[in-house]
Image (cartoon, coloured by chain):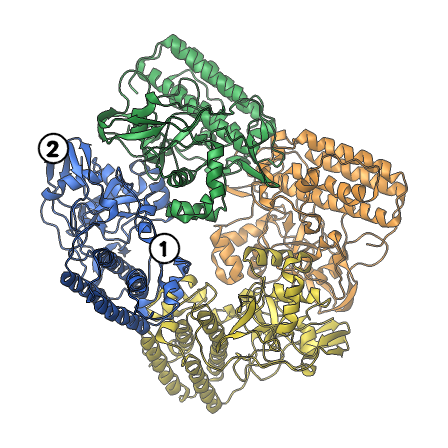
Chain colours: A green, B orange, C yellow, D blue
Amino acid sequence: MKKLIKETDLQQLFLDTRNRTRKICEPLLIEDYGPQPEKFVSPPKWHLAHSTWFFEEFVLKAYDLSYKEFHPDFSFLFNSYYNNLGDRIKRDDRGIMSRPSVSQVYQYRYHVDEAMVKFLQKSPNQEIRNLIELGVNHEQQHQELLVYDIKYILGNQPLKPVYGRQFIPDRIQGDLDWQTIEGGLVEVGAKGNHFFYDNESPRHKVYLNDFQICSRLITNGEYLEFIEYGGYQDFNLWHDEGWSFIRGNQLSAPLYWVLRDGIWYEYHMNGLQPLDKSLPVSHISFYEAFAFSQWAECRLPTEFEWECAAPFINHGSLWEWTNSAYLPYPGFRKVKGAVGEYNAKFMINQMVLRGGSLATPPGHFRKTYRNFFYPQERWLYCGIRLAK
Amino acid sequence: MKKLIKETDLQQLFLDTRNRTRKICEPLLIEDYGPQPEKFVSPPKWHLAHSTWFFEEFVLKAYDLSYKEFHPDFSFLFNSYYNNLGDRIKRDDRGIMSRPSVSQVYQYRYHVDEAMVKFLQKSPNQEIRNLIELGVNHEQQHQELLVYDIKYILGNQPLKPVYGRQFIPDRIQGDLDWQTIEGGLVEVGAKGNHFFYDNESPRHKVYLNDFQICSRLITNGEYLEFIEYGGYQDFNLWHDEGWSFIRGNQLSAPLYWVLRDGIWYEYHMNGLQPLDKSLPVSHISFYEAFAFSQWAECRLPTEFEWECAAPFINHGSLWEWTNSAYLPYPGFRKVKGAVGEYNAKFMINQMVLRGGSLATPPGHFRKTYRNFFYPQERWLYCGIRLAK
Amino acid sequence: MKKLIKETDLQQLFLDTRNRTRKICEPLLIEDYGPQPEKFVSPPKWHLAHSTWFFEEFVLKAYDLSYKEFHPDFSFLFNSYYNNLGDRIKRDDRGIMSRPSVSQVYQYRYHVDEAMVKFLQKSPNQEIRNLIELGVNHEQQHQELLVYDIKYILGNQPLKPVYGRQFIPDRIQGDLDWQTIEGGLVEVGAKGNHFFYDNESPRHKVYLNDFQICSRLITNGEYLEFIEYGGYQDFNLWHDEGWSFIRGNQLSAPLYWVLRDGIWYEYHMNGLQPLDKSLPVSHISFYEAFAFSQWAECRLPTEFEWECAAPFINHGSLWEWTNSAYLPYPGFRKVKGAVGEYNAKFMINQMVLRGGSLATPPGHFRKTYRNFFYPQERWLYCGIRLAK
Amino acid sequence: MKKLIKETDLQQLFLDTRNRTRKICEPLLIEDYGPQPEKFVSPPKWHLAHSTWFFEEFVLKAYDLSYKEFHPDFSFLFNSYYNNLGDRIKRDDRGIMSRPSVSQVYQYRYHVDEAMVKFLQKSPNQEIRNLIELGVNHEQQHQELLVYDIKYILGNQPLKPVYGRQFIPDRIQGDLDWQTIEGGLVEVGAKGNHFFYDNESPRHKVYLNDFQICSRLITNGEYLEFIEYGGYQDFNLWHDEGWSFIRGNQLSAPLYWVLRDGIWYEYHMNGLQPLDKSLPVSHISFYEAFAFSQWAECRLPTEFEWECAAPFINHGSLWEWTNSAYLPYPGFRKVKGAVGEYNAKFMINQMVLRGGSLATPPGHFRKTYRNFFYPQERWLYCGIRLAK
């Protein structure tokens, strides 16, 4: 995270990012900003406010003496998980907050943006600039979650409304094709002057065996074969926990697949569509990705294999489940204070995903980027790549 | 329910009722129409649509051949609990429905109102007129629930917003004063040509002992004495279930009471106010009403005692918990079909309340009216009257 | 509860009762004394100790100065629900108590019995004798629960072991036959010098319409017709709660019915037997009894109808669900202190059963006896009688 | 698992192992064999039967044509988690099985032992001998779980009974002392002719940085300092999940610590004892081990660091939590069929422990041995070793 960013670039980056968040919400009705259909979903209104709160709390209230707080209660309302910063409302209760209204939240954004632009003109020092850049990256992460959450909110409406033509994957061309990668002692992780999160470092050595990796993602058509074979009925393919998960939740297909009168449909941002076999399969849990790999008599790559193979494979439309647990790199040290809560405290029981998705903001792709989710989570833009 | 209502009166009644529902929602923001903070709360939008659905489903689709359905999916979306009318969405999921939008729902109301007015001009027969009158009474019941739900939604906002100056109880004057009522064989229940629900009939004889009943409700001040005595800590005052209920939910005061820095406040429709000891205590569960009565060395009246005492007591600001379980009257028969689901299927595990509240629509008061709620419910406008 | 019992009779009654409890447990293995398969079941060992604890706590420790406590921790271990007597272990944790051992518990019984016999020889006063008689009745109630619990423990073993030939109902002879009872103002409830519980009094007047009541219970064969008609699939027959209950728990037959290869079996104390259509149907919830009555186009009697009809009907093999909620009689007053916790605090959300069962101890039948259980409970010896 | 064991050695190993299981249970009362206080605990009776079932199912029924099954239902009753072998009773319901009795289970063991000894004399081939050796190792694993479960059952009795003088850790001597281990490319995992589980192989290369590891475990005294500092109140030391875990379960000390009147006690197999500060701290979750390491400004070792450091450190009294997730080694392949369910399907969401404990059977220690438990589990014999 030690990096040099020029002031003018930073202001542009800040404004572009703030603007992009707003654009993502443009197709929404006021009513769509509020619901929290599941605990893991946050209402769009909350994302809008929380990403703003980060700048207000960590930058303006901390370093800008002339700053006037927008509203005394917002700090409490829009803190997400930073225990160091005091109480916060329960995560599950975000969907009941009809107030502040959407328009108040946009006023809050406007208020903070204005103050930030003024503050940036005062030439803040490198440490503060780094913090602002972290805030930008934080908002970019929320942009991606915002897309997941909007899709989940709209996709779970009985009426299956249309969002627009954005955030829909492209078809995959060509057969499964294996890339052979030579192993040995390699270096992985981030280092240098560009932005990266603490969890991507320290750069360090790992030893890899030779391996093969698929040059493209698995398609809906291939996943359908797995379903039709009876993949969801054959416990030998599953982790014990995965088996409990699909049985307990009565799952038999990816998240947005719908079977109506014997025909499969898939909900996309442009509404419910007949299943397109050429699209990459998406919105599957780690458990399902793993079971598919077992059925295909392959496996999922590790995160380090993925990192080494990155230059040779086609990626970027969906995050890819790896078989690596999310753990600290050798020599990793948690930063003190609230910012240190950002990544380190989640390093248990989650799996690493690599590669980025079409919901990932531009400039947020990095081959060392470690995304992480619980193995049962499905609402993210994720897919399957095989290795062996 | 066999009653004679003139056509012109019915149209007026219909329009007044529809209008009143809309009025209740006037102070709301779009955002307030959607949330469902607890399973027992319905979003205002849902009330608006569901009360409309009743007329569309039971009247227009059944009897008006020229009627054009507003939207093919609304029947599924806004059915509440009528199993006879097919599938419906899970009650707990009402809060995630951002679509249809609030404005679509108002269009739905407008569409149905227009059709109803035309239909009413075609002189429907007595049976249909009775059904429409039931629909009006159904909507009036929802008006009352709408007030409870709006209060719950706003009262649970961290920012405690103001709704307006309506639906706030008046202060109580005077000391506790006992009315002695002579017992004997009396008749209770409804009979005749006016509107009443099936559960109020048949009119029948019951034998009552002599009893005394309080001429007014219990005040906040009196309830505060109970709290300060340690009423919430003394299990001897409680039902076993009531004790589990208050311990399990860590309750120590009525629903909308808030203790801040040692001072009690109460949320009313005009925001958070310092506790007013002269107001009637409200929003207490049956368990709390019962425990209070034990502490006062009295008891709650039965529903039949209440009915006999009605002419002698001051009532109408809050529903009054009785110690009667909600059960069928002797000779009661459930009506066949969906309308029969209205009342009968709830005749288990609920307690009767009598008297009406300031959230009760005008013309909806009746001394034979049997309201019923689960003993743990607190969000209704209810209070305590003692007997002995 | 104010009654006169002679000292010599009391001693005999005490010893007979204590002896009978032991006899009920005779067929058990040590292993059968411990399990608690469901929250509502108590391990037999617990019944043995708890009924003993009653005498130790309320009689010996209170009135016998020479008494030496058996073990200082037993008071805590074997208190059931008397909050007035201090802490107790959680009800759900009874099944994990491997210690004290079964033999220690029998020693405890022996120790208390010996002390009680000595104490009874000291001519305790009337008040104490009443307390001892209450203890005897308390133990008799536990004898009945003990039979339910033993049946539940053994009947839920995968191997379906045999207990013996006791506690198995007899076949029913004859057709459904209706008894007409004339209504009017009648007296119900207990009064006088014999033993009865506080909840059976005060004796008071109620007004009954004329009614008809079935002279015998419903048989397995009749209930099977209800099942085969599709009774468990027709929501119109059920309370809303009952419908949720059977759907949520996937119920489609009485508790101990088992369907194997298309043939119905029923578990009895003598093991799994082919379903006998002439036996009374048993182990059904109130919800099921009610739904059956709806299907038969009848209803369940009220507890007062039952009490009036008692001389004219054949009863005593199974408790009979009534459509009366368990509530206090007019003028009922809760006794102060721990004994007052006996009945009053359960007067909410339970339904009254009348009549007694073949698990009911001799001398424990009384036409004013009010048994009460939650509407979903099925492990008791209960059956269905129709009225109309 | 490909290994050569001589027939005579195998018979001796078999008999010794079977005998040792019985010995572990010797101090138990019949009543102690049955309870299942928590889902993760199995009743001792179940261990006795299940470890026997393994030999009956996989060896005798598969390869010994002359074998007569002990009881047709035991296969169903004592299958643990092998989905390939058909239905099984729910894991949570083991505690309600009072039948078969303890003595029947001992007869079952005797019956199978006798058959096994005869079968072993028929010179089974290498494949079968390997299977029997796996069965022996399986039973040894259950011996260790048996100790955990016995401790949990007895330690959760209100009366805190004594088991005996076995399975109590020794005091630790000496200060914290750091061993420096040089990193580089090293080989880890098992290979060769001795017995090991599939999850320990393939042996493979990993790259390690230089690191320091503590030569002994953390003591109760050191852990008490952590508690007294306020370790359970400082969320900065915890994983987000760990923090939820200790808050949700209101934990503030290791599993068997008890605070009475301000004095700490610890339950050991010889009863409740005043806390001995020189004993190694035990029965802490991974979360607690991690939080302690953060407080000590150190970390937990990885499983590969541990494996390399094994020759230099004092271990064997308690399993040691590592910061490695339980995942397959490169090139790992799951065996087909039921035996393949042994390890592979658990490779998600669990953490690796290394080193063995005083509950580990002799001959079951191996520096490549990978034990694995969920991060919240505490009833195992586990402790804390620091690295940095």
Name the kind of residue labelled 2 in the image. Glu
Q: Amino acid at mark 1?
A: Tyr
Q: Quadrant of the N terminus of chain C?
A: bottom right
Please provide percent x and percent y for residue B115. Answer: 82, 35
Residue C157 position within the rendered picture, expressed as x and y whole percent measured from the top left: 43, 68
Viewer-proximal residue among B255 and C293: C293
Q: In which quarter of the view is residue A160 placed?
A: top right
Q: Secondary structure at mark 2?
A: loop
Drawn side of residue D358 relative to residue A280, left or right = left
Instruction: Tell which subunit mark 1 falls on.
Output: D
The Cα atoms of the two marked residues, 2 and 1, are separated by 42 Å
Q: From this viewpoint, is residue D157 visible?
A: no
Above or below, comparing residue A254 to residue B179 in the picture: above
Q: Residue A386: give its label.
A: none
Same subunit under labels 2 and 1?
yes
- Does residue A184 appear to the left or right of C118 in the view shown? left
Q: Residue furthest bottom?
A: C8
Q: Which mark is residue D81?
A: 1
**Of discs 2 and 1, which sits in the foreground?**
1
- SS category of the residue bearing label 1: loop
Residue B158 located left or right of residue B318: left
Location of mark 2 (residue) = D182
* Residue placed most toward the observer, C108 or A197: A197
Considering only vertical position in the picture, is C179 above or below A241?
below
Residue B40: x, y in percent?
60, 46
Disc 2: host chain:
D
The residue sitting at 19% across, 59% down in the picture is D167
Quarter occupied by the C terminus of chain C: bottom right
Question: x%, y% of residue D58?
Answer: 30, 60
Mark 2, other Cα within 10 Å: few <14 / some 14–19 / many ≥20? few
Q: Earlier in the sequence, mark 2 or mark 1?
A: 1
Can residue B197 be seen here? The reply is: yes
